[in-house]
Image (spheres, rainbow, N blue to C red):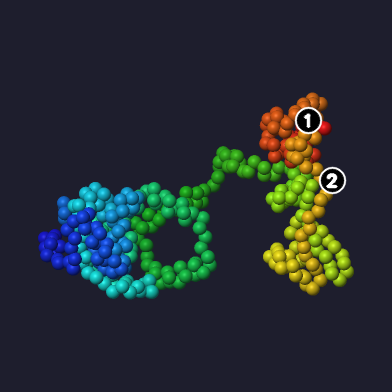
Amino acid sequence: MEKNKFIKNSFLPIKEYKNAELQRLEILLENKNKSGVYRWTNLKNNKSYIGSAKNLSKRLNTYFSLSYLKRCDYKSKIYSALLKYGHLNFKLEILEYCDNVSILNKNYLSDWEEKEQFYINLLKPEYNICKTVRTTLGKKHKESTKIKISNSNLGKKRSEETKKLLRESKVGYNLGKRHTEEFKNKLKGRMPWNFGLKYTDDLKNKLKGRIPWNLNIKYTEEFKKRFKNCYSDEALSKGLATRLGLNANQRRFIEIKNINTGEINKFLFAYKANMFLNCSSWTFYKYIKKNTIYKKIYQLSYKIETLPHLTNIKSEIKSGYIRWVIVKNINTGEINKFKTISKASIFLNCSRSTLYRYINNKIIFKEKYQISLEN
């Protein structure tokens, strides 16, 4: 211990800044674009920290940023000490300048990292948590951090290539190794809690409650019809027309024309056109964008058409053509009239968009309400 104190006190650095706070500008200017090893020393308790950097000015500047220190004080003892004692009670020393050349191979240390390791071994600084460069040996994680690391790895699947590399790295690792009885007893505690467990009837009944609520439910024909109408081609195409900024009675069709026979086929959706042409979506969009002939036969294009049987309910309501929203209870025969869609949606406890969908598709709402519009 005394020998270590003697080395620390008798060691002469290349540069010394006795008051880090007052000499901040001088520190940053003199060490700009220089690589080397530095040491922070607490003048109150004589504890120190050793670090290195490729660009000393850039690295040292982070120590003078209070917001950075406060954000990261839990990671480093030197950050906490600088916040506690202040830069006035610290001196900064440049132990050695190094070659500013990066090593491309990650398995080898750069010049400044090698020198940092040398000075850590020689001077044994108290504020350095990790005593080995480029490792986290000696660093202890909080319980909350351990839980976060554990959760981030849950369900992570390794590729076959990664598994192969891991197997190769472990070849011969435990060759001929025999576990002690003490270690075997430790391993027993790591066995899965339900290993070899036979479920009791009581536990089986409890697990039944965790089965998805709709498992094995047989849908009625009426329900299937309602579901089909909600997601019919007409309903979906209307959503697409809205996104394209078209009127409610307009639809965009994909037209495929056979230039040899003159035959024309129209499709509302790209996936149906893909099935007809037996090609991928990417190929389809490429030909339609470049306006080129597919397989020297088919000409692809978009066509917007106005369909007379479709009505724009929203525009009719806003313009005053439709005065009443009729809500009829098909079970009791009760009829309620509302002047606005908003009042009808409040009565039915649903959104206006839901109400528009049921009116357009002429579907029974909640299996008992028939909704219609009256002039």
Say which residue label 1 marks. Answer: 324
Q: Is residue 360 above or below residue 324?
A: below
Three-letter residue code for mark 1: Trp
Say which residue label 2 marks. Answer: 309
Dot 1, crowdedness within 10 Å: few (<14), some or many (≥20)?
some
Would you identify the image quadrant in which residue 112 lies? bottom left
In the image, 145: left or right of 158?
A: left
In the image, 268: left or right of 32?
A: right
- Residue at the far front: name it: 319
Residue 204, how many percent across, how many down?
A: 58, 42
Secondary structure at numbered mark 1: strand
- The first of marks 1 and 2 along the sequence is 2
Decide if residue 74 is in sight here: no
Dot 2, crowdedness within 10 Å: few (<14), some or many (≥20)?
few
Q: How many marks?
A: 2
Q: Quadrant of the N terminus?
A: bottom left
60 or 247: nearer the eye? 247
